[in-house]
Image (tube, rainbow, N blue to C red):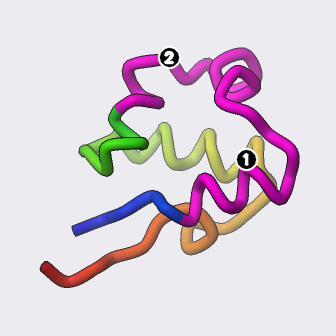
Amino acid sequence: MIVFDKLWVTMKEKGVSTYTLRERCGIDSKTVRRLKANENVETKTLDKLCAVLGCKLEDIAEFIKD
């Protein structure tokens, strides 16, 4: 299972809000909801997140074995 717990930590460290994600990344509120629920998101969304946060994928997502 892919979880996005690290995303929220990275966002807090960098002072980025979900509002900023929506405005700067073009990530809609439904996608933010999916991230919070650890549901599927497109790889282009992950690319946008890494670009706006200036981080690597492992800074926002983690694989946890079920």
Query: Can you give x and y, in whole percent of width and height, for residue 4 in the image?
Result: 45, 58
Which residue is identified by label 2? 28
Q: Quadrant of the N terminus?
A: bottom left
Mark 2: amino acid: Asp
What element does badge 1 sit on? helix
Identify the residue at the far bottom of this view.
65
What residue is at 57 percent from the left and 47 percent from the top? 47
What residue is at 79 percent from the left and 39 percent from the top? 16
Could you tell whether 63 is left or right of 19 in the image? left
Which of the numbered marks, if any, corresponds to residue 26? Answer: none
Few, some or many residues within 10 Å of mark 2 (<14, 14–19, 20+)? few
Q: Quick check: is 44 in the magenta stretch?
A: no
Relative height, residue 28 to residue 50 (above, below): above
Mark 1: amino acid: Ala
Q: Do the residues under discs 2 and 1 have CB atoms within 8 angstroms?
A: no
Which residue is identified by label 1? 51
What element does badge 2 sit on? loop
Q: Nearer the viewer, mark 2 or mark 1?
A: 2
Name the image quarter holding residue 42: top left
Name the image quarter holding residue 60: bottom right
What residue is at 41 percent from the left and 42 percent from the top? 36
Q: Which circle's residue, 2 or 1, is located before the other in the chain?
A: 2
Q: From mark 2 to mark 1, how far is it between C-alphas?
A: 16 Å
Looking at the picture, tell me which residue is in the foreground, 42 or 30. Answer: 30
Question: Magenta segment, which residues?
Answer: 6-33
Q: Quick check: is 9 in the magenta stretch?
A: yes
Looking at the picture, tell me which residue is in the foreground, 32 or 44. Answer: 32
